[in-house]
Image (cartoon, coloured by chain):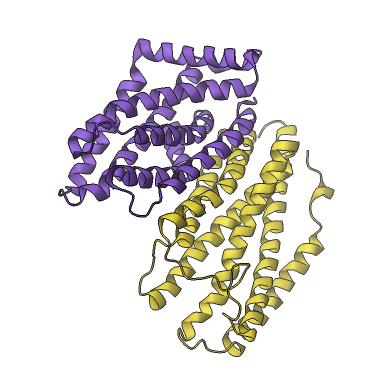
Amino acid sequence: MVTENQFPADPIRVVLLFLSGILMFISLWLIFMWAPMEQVMGQVQRIFYFHVPIAWVGFLAFSVVFFSSILYLWKGERHWDALGHSAAEIGVLFTTLMVISGAVWAKPVWGVWWTWDPRLTTSLILWLLYAGYLMLRAYSPTNAQAARYSAVLGVIAFVDVPIVYFAVSWWRNIHPEMVVGPLAESGALEGSMVTTLLVSLAAFTVLFGYMLLERFSLRNMEDTLGSIKSQKGGM
Amino acid sequence: MSGFLLPVITLVLKDILLEVRNKEAVSSILLFGFLVAIIFNFAFDPTPKMVGLIVPGIIWVSFTFAGVLGFNRSFVLEKDNGSIDGLMLCPVSRDVIYFGKLIGIVIVLLFMEILLLPVFAILYDFPLFIPELLIIAVLATIGFSAVGVLFSAIAVNTRSREAILPLIILPLTIPVIIAAVEATSAIIYGDALGSVGRWWQLLAAFDVILLVLSSILFGAVLEE
């Protein structure tokens, strides 16, 4: 039974909302006014500052699904399921945006909307897996079953992703090199571009935190409402 | 050990006996697998030159789709006749039920594959008997079924049982399908890239990881 004081305090959400708004304005200014024009790709390269943070939030959301799925199966507490479900919805939303922003960027640069490059393919399979996660929930007869079944999928899907990545990269190996991250070549990005990217990453991460808390507390309220209804004699 | 092995064997024998008596699963997946291959033949209309490119794909798409059909049936009988409750009341661990169902379905699928491979060999003109192909088939079928059994136990409890299962197991088993197709292609038509070794490894790694994970998670699925 969820009680009032288990909801995340409202002030946190308000702070996160304003913080993500401010950071979003700063990063918009940095992206369009401050960051230098990329020499080869031109204006269209600025999609990069949206595409990478959106992809990052997608993966972050799915790792939240993974950990809350494990915790739900282990502890059986309802709020872990609510957290996992909320993160999965946000993850599917951002993976969709990632594929769309990637396609818009790929068309002028690579000349095609889509290629079967390992990272693109893995992202697409990731999207399919978590769309399946939401479908499985929708088709489960009871909330308890939806929670258990989707937690099982939440664990397996996350473990499966690296295997998918290996399989797909051995299958097709034509992808462009990483620009940031552990495998990145140094000097691939100019300093001001890195700053812009980092601010944009921070903005999107805070936005993710806000969306997750908002969805999570809404879901908890729905649960409380449901249990009150059933206490008052099944409406 | 015998406390684990004996009940598993009993469960497998139960499924096999059931199958030998009514032959429903084997006949339907056999015919369906064959039909998929025939449909692909019309869809691609392969010239002798193209055959090498598409035959491994045809083989594995047909096995995969037939397998999904098999998984859909795997728990339907248990559920509809209420025997799943009987299984859960048995004084055996959930792992026993998982591995019993898994070995049962793997045997049925391998039976289908062993019968269909020579048919494909005749239709598409590749050597009838290739031992390596059988080993690939065994590894791929185990990996595919490790996930398939787990999610067929889930799907049988959902609305629209048949619709949800392929939506979940097909994306999960994409590594198995890729590895099986590439390895088959290398075995039948020559391994120009020397890549067979890594596909073996990938299949074996997938099998081990997914078997361990699925058998652990299976307990959570049956909990009622």
Residue at point 51%, 48% (across, down): A129
Q: The purple chain is which one?
A: B
Q: Quadrant of the rendered structure where residue B24 is?
A: top left
The answer to whether residue A225 is visible is no
Q: Nearer the viewer, residue B52 or A56?
A: B52
Which hue belongs to chain A? yellow
Residue displayed at 60% across by 69% down: A53
Question: Is A74 or A5 nearer to us in this picture?
Answer: A74
Q: Position of residue B189 (x, y in %)?
A: 27, 46
- Residue A223 in picture, x, y percent from top left: 70, 42
Would residue A177 appear left or right of B194 to someone viewing this image?
Answer: right
Q: Which of B5 and B13 is in front in this view?
A: B5
- Residue A62 on image: x %, y %: 61, 53
- Which sits in the foreground, A145 or A36? A36
Q: Residue at the right extreme?
A: A5
Tell me the quarter of the picture where residue B105 sits.
Answer: top left
